[in-house]
Amino acid sequence: MRISCPHCGERDHREFEYLGSAKLLERPDGGDRAAFHDYVFQRKNPTGENAELWQHVMGCSAWLHVVRNITTHEITAVKLARDVKAAAR
Amino acid sequence: MHYSALQILKNGLTGNKGWKPVWRDPEPKKSYDIVIIGGGGHGLATAYYLAKTHGIQNIAVLEKGYLGGGNVGRNTTIVRANYLLDGNLEFYSHSLKLWENLEQELNYNAMLSQRGCLLLAHNDGQFDGLARRGNANLATGDDAVLMSADDVRAFTPYLNFDDARFPIRGGLLQRTGGTARHDAVAWGYARGADMRGVDLIQNCEVTGFRIEGGKIKGVETSRGYIGAGKVGMSVAGRTSQVAQMAGLRLPIESHVLQAFVTEGVKPVIDTVISFGMGHFYISQSDKGGLVFGGDIDGYNSYSQRGNLPMVEHVAEAGMALMPMIGKSRMLRSWGGIMDMSMDGSPIIDKTPIEGLFLNGGWCYGGFKAVPAAGAAFAHLMATGEKATWATKFNLNRFETGHVIDDEGTGARPNQH
Amino acid sequence: MNRFPTGGLIDRDISIPFTFDGQTYTAHPGDTLASALLANGVRLMGRSFKYHRPRGVLTAGSEEPNALMEIGIGADCTPNTRATTQEVYNGMVAQSQNRFPTLKADILAVNDLLSPFLGAGFYYKTFMWPKKFWEAIYEPIIRRAAGLGRLSGQADTADYDKAWAYCDVLIIGGGPAGLMAALTAAKGGAKIILADEDFIIGGRLNSEQTEVDGKHSQRWAAEVATQLAEMPNVRVMTRTTVTGAYDGGTYGAVERVGDHIADAHGAPRQIFWRIVAKHTILAAGATERPIAFPNNDRPGIMLASAVRTYAHRYGVAAGQRVAVFTNNDDGWRTARDLMALGVTVTGLIDARTDVAPDVDCPVFTGAAVVGTGGRLGIERLSVRTSDGSIQQINADCLAVSGGWNPSLHLTGHMGGKPTWREDIAAFVPSPDSIPNLVTVGAANGTFSTLGALKEGMAAAKAALKNLRLKQVRPKVPAADDAQGAVTAFWHVPDVKGRSWLDFQNDVTVKDIAVAHRENFRSVEHMKRYTTLGMATDQGKMSNMGALAVMSALTGQSIPETGTTIFRPPYTPVQMGALGAGAAGKGFAPERLTTSHDWATSRGASMIEVGLWHRASWFPREGETYWRQSCDREVKMVREAVGVCDVSTLGKIDIQGPDAGVFLDRVYTNVFSTLKVGKVRYGLMLREDGMVLDDGTTACIGQNHYVMTTTTGATGPVMSHLEFCAQCLWPELDVTMISVTEQWAQIAVAGPKSRELLAGLIDDISNESFPFMGCGAVSISGVNGRLFRISYSGELAYEIAVPARYGESLMDELVKRAEALGGGVYGMEALNVLRIEKGFLTHAEMDGRVTAADMGMSGMMSTKKDFIGKVSSQRDGLNDPMREQLVGIKPTGAVRQILGGSIMVNVDADPIRENMQGHVTSVCYSPTLDGMIGLAFVKGGHARIGQTIRAVDLLRNVDTLCEIVSPQFHDPEGEKLRG
Amino acid sequence: MADFKLHPSEAPIGQPIEIGETILACIQPANILSIAPFKGQGMAVTDTLKAVLKLALPTVGKVTAKKHIRAMWAGQGQWFVVGDIALEALTEALDTKAAVTDQSDAWVVLTLEGADASEVMSRLCSLDLGALEQGQTARAEFAHMMSCITPTSAGFEIMIMRSFAKTAIHHTREAMRKLAAQQAL
């Protein structure tokens, strides 16, 4: 896979590290245990497009919000996770 | 038809024309007492034990492709019982015992070969970790031998002991671990189930559940509606998708794990070697191919194929551990989709929907688990009770905090 | 012999000696091992896998299933090498394989006599009785018989390399389609790579007697190749096989740099390339397929295309009396070409009835070969003519042409399924099987030379357009436009005897029938049950024939019966190339501290910690065992002063107006209240409530902190912090950067540490540097940092200086320590010191423990949220019977404790059900004069003072222990505050 | 009171290493300082740098230079100023505008020059080197290590973390050796 880092351009995915679903951006406020259980453990795990988090560890260190098809591996959008999170606020 | 040397002789002399189908291809009935979704190792074993141990015969196994076409036919065939934590310890211990009698029980040669399974340690901390594991295995009644670096050298002299990046500090050998012929396990269970009246229905994809009043009624399939008293999901790799049709969301991600085989060579490796530091393991098949693998590629995937970084990493680890394989050639690589659970351990449990049961989240452990998981899932579906060797694989353990995290990496499926 | 006096792309002026099975032969430059052996009249080149049937060369390419050999001797021996692609070099030693004692007299050929009992899947039905016999008797015999060639068993010390290349257009295959594509794309200015697995560019242009652009096709190919090589935007890579197609336009390829020469003189034998291409043109050609008929596997029975290749390219007659069996027009061409070269063609057998071959030799249409004879090679064949009569024909070579299979393998690597084309009776690639890849020429089912040229050009023009490069209109050269008619004909029906489908694995038409009979009818079942297609050619020679047989048995069409999936690699890839650079120490980078050379020069024993090398202990004269050094080093620290390089710990510089708030959220305890000049110990959890790491963080200025992490967790912690800052709270104004490498940090520990430092630092008083104080210092004019922190429980400091001064400072501190009765200490002593004090490492923080398990619930602030807070409140994590951290020491006769022991109650059996915990760390404590350990024990915090057993079943040690506080040494902490 | 001097360690490469058509050497800039602007301070940081060093912060992936000092992008929100500029001076100038750290000892700067520099690099680094022009800089993997790769008129400058320097030099040297041997065939 080639991931187009918004800073560094297109790079082989070996430069990146995968974390998981982009739902991890949405850390619950407050102390609701059910909300945290869902946040930490439960996954939709779709077969089609999925928003997920990768870090460009061997490059600029930015965390990226990557929209990728889980079956074809086609990547349709890459944004800075920081920007996605800020926009959601 | 009972298989025996005599049978082979008889057929050999008569042009091999007397062999009978190993399983029937029945049309699906309108309804069954129990429907198992998934004709892989687990689903077939579950049906077999339901029929054999629990005397239930009105069973169907629904397979969307061909029998044994999922992970049971694309793994690296390792069988072992050298886990670390309670929950896994007794489960895999029980599984290995079932493996040891499987061929006679099924009258099918699955070629279980207990040629040993060696885990390597490269520093004192890892060595202590192996000791803890070995002690737990011995306490569970399984085999374990702690080896010094010299012991390892005597046992596997072809490893790199002289200029290794991570010198070998010692190892833990389980002599009862080894390999089996993966396809034969699926076929043997399929044959056993079919002989006991189970309908094995291929090319039949489940497309939905019929649930009324919180209770399962049947399944919609590509070959029409099939009613069911109970339904078991045994579809590792697609568990999230199937469960979602019942409105369930699970602590599972799907990842691709690659496996590799080289061209056949004369015997050079007589055991299974696991190089934890390099995320690499290897054995040699009876045909002569070196069978090896490593970690999952590391990203969610439903494609049964991987990418080059892991291919290269695995080859690099192989060259680091045993540079004698440099002149063998990788013949084929393939991928399987792993149900990676959030603690690296499986789920065998009821679901919130009455009559709907779940067997999934197997991560890398699915193949070696086939007998015990099939037997445990059958026990659960037949009796409503957990089997004694599988009491801790609960669906709600993430809520309660009773996770079974053998790797200690937490809710990071790609690190288990 | 069998070499024609002229013709071919070989240099007859030079003779190269080589040996095969000990016999010396000669070859010419341009020869492969197969062509050279054929030229020397050698037909028998191998044995099949299962029945050990005699095998000769079947093909002239990488798809060869039969002529596999061991090349080279000793550690240089490469098994399973295809004689059809291996170029002969001076002095080459080739050996046949999988035979004993000799190729001609192979004992295991007895298997062939037993074949009625060894058919498809026989082993699943037997070898089960008695139970023990499988592993004791049957399996060892099978394993010894199985396998092909031998690995030497010695380390592969050859050089390999890996590399990256980028291009606009990757062209795979240098036949007519590939060359035309390359020429077109190159003229348009695209950056191109043309890769061909062969050592001469041209593909079948080198194998046929045909003309392109009015000249011999061999000459045209050579001219175009030269023209391309001279263009700056073109990289022509011969001997380079593109082995796999992966996501994002990435391709794997192997370049064989040194396999064709006797001594590569330090050049890599092979280079594994990762080629990233914007566009790819697959022009991989096609492979001819055999026809299944009884005993179609004898040496001398070859593909017709191979017979032509040996004739035209290598100037070799594959036989003196050749018969041809075909279902298509290519067979006629074979007969004509051979006759033109003066070879006798003893018969042309065409399976088709409605054709009239215009060939001047005995012709049989509507006929089929129904048998062959000859002991170690074909001598005669039986032909069933159109009227049903049988005719015998003499031949020492039978050229078989069953039509062509497009080489579509790469297009299946990403899961693409091919499309059936009835007109050519073959699968062709489906469009878009691989993003941005188009298939042209024979690989696309276009078998005429002109058609291939045209398709190659068209694909290149489309690529240029997509790349927005200039459009060019090169002229399509004149060439043969015959597509060649074919009628599907897969195997000869109604025959006796075995007809081979998979020549290497010995799978015959009868085996497919057995699979069908037993209901292994899906293609995958058939393959797995019979092992068809599992040979080293991945089924290139066998899959289609077997599919056709199964389709006939089931009554379904071939596309309904299915296709098989081709997986990477296209042809097998040597592990040495794929794993290039990793043998020896190359597997992972090595990290060295600034005092590394200093330490090794003092005889330090080094160990790995993550990627780092650290000094384990420093033996002094007379010390022969590590414990002697370790005990002395511990005593030194406890009684005088020790010096230890601790630079490997992670150091993260954190700054910004919100830095304090940020730390509050990532640590369980509060940091925003930390004053400038102070250090605090912190505990970090994962979001699932388990401990991630611990360490100290110093406030070195307003909104300016330096965090330390454990050595092993540095990367994960940095990544975690960046996740928190970027993904969770981007609104916080905080920056972070690793300064691990900037600072060499050295611990000075022991009651005399202040005395030692007093000679170096102006003001080292307790007032200026109280316990957990920090500040800037100057050391001989070098700006450094001093932290009063202790990992030993003694009065201790850590001094940081810019890394370039690390070695110098280490040397100076150790000299001064030695003057005070102390000295340097290593990791072993450091470990003892921390165990005595009950400090933790990742032996304890193994990813499964909570703060409460470690007795640190008090560090979980109730006043704020932090990562892991909510999850750590789950009931299961607050069970009082969880395993909790305690200290243990022996109280009985057995004084030894082993790491990894399990804990059981005094009277309990050491079985799983009774396990109470496990031992994480142990050491001999010189301070307490005995073994001590840290352990996790169920409900341990409430069991201090009780006795328990640490049991090691592996090593037979059973130790009665007292459960104690993990702080063995100075539990009140008076020493470190002193 | 100090009766001794701390002295710096030797550079990891003394005499430049020349194999075939490539030369590997090591240079030691006077200082490498990191600058990470605080929120909304990017312009203010650039203004300050312009005033102090006559340099602006380059955009992502770029390098700007003025005499013997240059500023290079070094990752998300991070820049390195390389040259003879004291930590204290820059820290003071940027005070509340940016985080400044000393990285002078954290990095070893290698230079790889000569006709085959690109070909050697292609053995070690996954970057599309043909697309990397002078004036640009990239954070990238180099032989499994983090690095900053900057093309120069004569080849490349490769910044590697100090503890990795020996490994980086070893691998580069090996790549040079193998390429030279290949070309001699």
Image (tube, coloured by chain):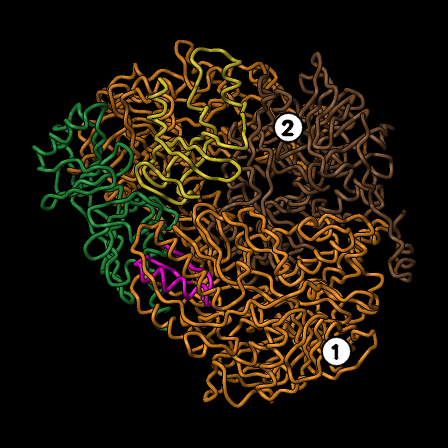
Chain colours: A yellow, B brown, C orange, D green
CA distance for labels 1 and 2: 58 Å
- Residue C93 shows which numbered tag? none
* Badge 2 amino acid: Val
Residue found at x 63% / y 85%: C41
Q: Is residue C874 above or below residue C693?
A: above
What chain does badge 2 belong to?
B
Q: Which residues are the magenta region?
A: C168-194
Viewer-nearest residue: B238 or C878: B238
Q: Position of residue D177 (x, y in %)?
A: 34, 64
Q: Is residue A56 left or right of residue C144?
A: left
Three-letter amino acid code of the residue under disc 1: Ala
Q: Nearer the viewer, mark 1 or mark 2?
A: 2
Residue under pointer 2: B242
Q: Secondary structure at mark 1?
A: loop
Residue C837 seen in the figure: no
Q: Badge 1 sits on which subunit?
A: C
Left/right of residue B104 with respect to residue C417 in the rendered view: right
C107 and B321: which is toward the camera:
C107
Tell me if C689 is positioned left or right of D49 in this view.
right
B295 vs D75, left or right, is right
* Residue B260 forms part of the magenta stretch: no
Binning the other alpha carbons within 10 Å of mark 1 as few (below 14), some (14 to 19) or many (20 upward) gives few
- The residue beneath circle 1 is C105
> x%, y% of residue C412?
56, 51
Image location of residue D104, percent across then percent down: 21, 41
**How many numbered discs?**
2
Q: For numbered disc 2, what is the local secondary structure?
A: helix
Say above or below: C668 vs D170. Answer: above
Work out whether residue B193 or residue C2 is closer to the camera in this orientation and state it: C2
Which residue is painted at 32% across and 22% down in the image? C730
Residue B336 seen: yes
